[in-house]
């Protein structure tokens, strides 16, 4: 297979799309018939704070950062129904996947989307006033229904953040994998190479793992700085773990 046909991109169907029952419309719009792309992974995720912070790491420190975490975690659209707080994560594959999906998704800001690209997915979004504790307007939250990776680097980081290799069929994996020979455990923001009471086992011998994650874990376990932070590696292993609520 030509390497270009393995290009992957991450899509998140965000809580406002779920609440407005746009899921079927989005799946159909992004279907192989319309985009020529293939589904290679999908999961329904109750998004933890750790996952939201890692996903939007590039926006840390910006005034709208807390609002987009709450939005992704479903706190804005399902504040009284925690069991409905979820997103659908989908990996799509195919030539030019990143650009094709960003084109259909449209501009970040729904108002701009309506003006510049009527009919794109985000033209169906809404703007919500953001206020500080005193009730002063500090900006607007962009409820734009969908996330799509913007660049090749973002796509790789995001696919590896949300998916384990085994969430994707072996012949559809775009990034190198390795089999773990070690155990790794996580507890209270620390990594352990041996069992620790109340920890979560994130990797065991024979588990298939992203090669870059394993390289990071080996370094982090020895206290050496690594290319990926501990949370960026660990977050996917805590997806839908009840305990992750606290992390
Ligand atoms: P995109 O989702 O198009 O890649 P960004 O990565 O810039 O856009 O932003 C991530 C998300 O944060 C956006 O989808 C949107 O929901 C929100 N956002 C971005 N910029 C702003 C802003 N200036 N004010 C409020 N929310 C924003
Ligand atoms: Mg972005």
Image (cartoon, helix red, strand yellow):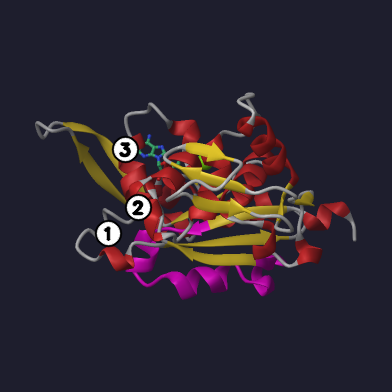
Image spot of residue 195 (x, y percent): 55, 48
Tell me which segment is drawn in magenta: 12-40
Q: Is residue 220 left or right of residue 113?
A: right
Q: Is residue 117 left or right of residue 126?
A: right
Q: Disc 2 and disc 3: Cα gap in Å?
A: 17 Å
Is residue 144 visible to us here? no
Give the Cα separation between the discs numbered 3 and 1.
15 Å
Looking at the rendered structure, the secondary structure element under dot 2 is helix
Q: Residue 121, image x and y in percent?
A: 48, 59
Instruction: Tell me the mark number nearer the camera, choosing from 2 and 1.
Output: 2
Q: Is residue 92 above or below residue 54?
A: below
Q: Residue at x 30, y 41 (%)?
A: 67
Residue underneath mark 2: 245
Task: Return the residue at label 1.
Answer: 77
Cβ atoms under marks 3 and 1 closer than 8 Å: no
Residue at 49% in and 52% down:
200
For the C terminus, give its image quadrant: top left
Of 245 and 8, which appears nearest the observer?
245
Which callout, 3 or 1, points at the residue further toward the start of the chain? 3
Neighbourhood count class around disc 1 (C-alpha, 10 Å): few under 14, some 14–19, many 20 upward? many
> On the picture, is 13 further left or further right than 229?
left
Percent x, y of residue 125? 37, 55
* Mark 2: few/some/many CA within 10 Å (<14, 14-19, 20+): some
Instruction: Answer yes or no: is residue 51 visible.
Output: yes
Label 3, on which residue? 66
Q: Earlier in the sequence, mark 2 or mark 1?
A: 1
Q: Secondary structure at mark 1?
A: loop
Label 3 lies in ligand 1 vicinity (Cβ under 8 Å): no
């Amino acid at each position: 297979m030509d390497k270009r046909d393995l290009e992957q991109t991450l899509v998140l169907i965000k809580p406002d799309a779920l609440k407005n029952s746009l899921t079927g419309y989005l799946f159909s719009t992004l279907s192989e018939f319309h985009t020529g792309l293939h589904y290679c992974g999908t999961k329904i995720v109750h998004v933890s704070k750790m996952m939201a912070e890692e996903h939007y790491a590039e926006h840390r420190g910006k005034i709208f950062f807390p609002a987009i975490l709450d939005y992704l975690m479903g706190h804005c659209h399902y504040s009284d129904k925690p069991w409905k707080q979820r997103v659908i994560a989908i990996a799509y594959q195919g030539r030019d996947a990143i650009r094709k999906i960003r084109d259909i998704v449209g501009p970040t800001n729904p108002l701009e989307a309506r003006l510049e690209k009527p009919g794109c997915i985000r033209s169906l979004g809404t703007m919500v006033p953001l206020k500080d504790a005193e009730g002063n307007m500090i900006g607007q939250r962009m409820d734009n229904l969908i996330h799509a990776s913007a660049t090749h680097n973002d796509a790789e980081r995001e696919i590896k953040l949300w998916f384990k290799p085994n969430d994707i069929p072996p012949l559809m994996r775009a990034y190198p994998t390795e089999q773990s020979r070690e155990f790794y455990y996580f507890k209270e923001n620390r990594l352990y190479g041996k069992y620790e009471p109340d920890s979560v086992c994130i990797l065991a011998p024979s588990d298939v793992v992203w090669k870059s994650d394993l390289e990071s874990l080996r370094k982090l376990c020895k206290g050496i700085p690594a290319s990926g932070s501990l949370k960026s590696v660990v977050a996917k292993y805590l997806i839908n773990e009840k305990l992750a609520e606290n992390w």
